[in-house]
Image (tube, coloured by chain):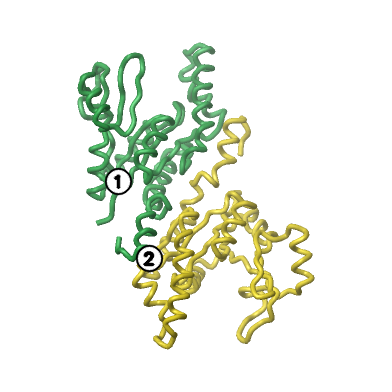
Chain colours: A yellow, B green
Amino acid sequence: MNKGGVFVVAGPSGSGKDTLFKELFKRKPEIKFSISSITRPMRVGEVEGEKYNFITREKFLSMLENDELLEYNEYIGNYYGTPKAPVIAAIENGDDILIEVDVNGAKEICQKLPEAITVFIMPPSYKELKRRLSGRGTETQDLIDKRMKEALNEIARATEFDYIVVNDDIQTAVDDIIEVMSSSRLALKRQKNLIDGVLSNVES
Amino acid sequence: MNKGGVFVVAGPSGSGKDTLFKELFKRKPEIKFSISSITRPMRVGEVEGEKYNFITREKFLSMLENDELLEYNEYIGNYYGTPKAPVIAAIENGDDILIEVDVNGAKEICQKLPEAITVFIMPPSYKELKRRLSGRGTETQDLIDKRMKEALNEIARATEFDYIVVNDDIQTAVDDIIEVMSSSRLALKRQKNLIDGVLSNVES
């Protein structure tokens, strides 16, 4: 059986990532989603095991010590991480799995899983990014400027990714992600075993 | 209008490249093919402007001097090169263009056209490669060993390419190349202008 692919997806606020994912999983419910393990308290409306597994600080630190995380970070005293086991299980089972992370997390994951395919979700233009980040017009100029600066810092690091998907029209962007997921099986990152197999006369 | 893509394709003898290209251009006649400029005499059955432009040594050297070649090499006293102008014209016109080269040529082209997408055509296995290179059983063992060694040397450099297409079943391999050509518009190499455009608030 062919292995599944690991797709590490990042994008700044204003890229419309959340809507995109919602639409992607509606159209392709067979794609797995990597559930983050986090130590912050559950918020109203959140459901255990939907987007996050809410775990204790002790549990998190023991996972970290046992190398059970593909990436993690700490934010205002809480830990956020991507557990390794479900990702490995998915690909061994032939399933594609999507991991939502930030730019640093994407880099960490690729160090541990060099075959991971990275995708950056881009707003279509500076102007449209600004429009989206300005929200309903109730934000202060300072807050908008701060968001804009953060988003542009992330976009400057889009060059670290394998694929760039522009989220202008949502259906086109979903088509593009699906095309990346399908065609990336031909990308060098995912074909290295095959090359080794031919060179060493071992069937892969 | 969107620019076309440059697809630099290499593969060892035994990869079945020629049959693959024939089938690809039958299915996608709109794809342009880069015609090499060469200085060796025309052989029986060859047609000017089909696969090669037969030019004089003087003309070739003047093209070389004027930086009108994307790559070239010399083989037994004759020159072989890829002219730059038709490639640039194709992409500016929104057409995809395929360039057939060896592994060294692919590297040279990417230095001059960093957005070029490289594809390596692989035989499905060591055993099948050997079978294909043994031909009709009329070759000497020495010749087969020599061909095999050359092919494996090229395959060892497949890791320099963006995509690996296995040529086992010809129709599947053609499907795969078409998928690479379509989806690689989303690859980082071809999206760098877009990133620069958003960062600098310039519409691309």
Secondary structure type for disc 2: helix
Chain holding disc 2? A
Disc 1 residue crowd, few under 14, some 14–19, many 20+, Cα 10 Å: many
Disc 2 residue crowd, few under 14, some 14–19, many 20+, Cα 10 Å: few
Which residue is at the front of the view, A8 or B111?
B111
Instruction: Name which residue lies at 28% across and 55% down.
Output: B2
x and y percent of residue B194 in the render? 36, 59
Tell me the distance, in whole angstroms, between the alpha carbons under discs 2 and 1.
Answer: 21 Å
Which residue is at the front of the view, B31 or B115?
B115
x and y percent of residue A61 in the render? 76, 66
Instruction: Name which residue lies at 57% across and 41% down.
Output: A192
Chain holding disc 1? B
Q: Do marks 2 and 1 both belong to one polypeptide chain?
A: no
Give the amino acid type for the residue marked by disc 1 in the picture.
Asp
Q: Is residue B107 left or right of residue B54?
A: right
Which numbered dot is residue A172? Answer: 2
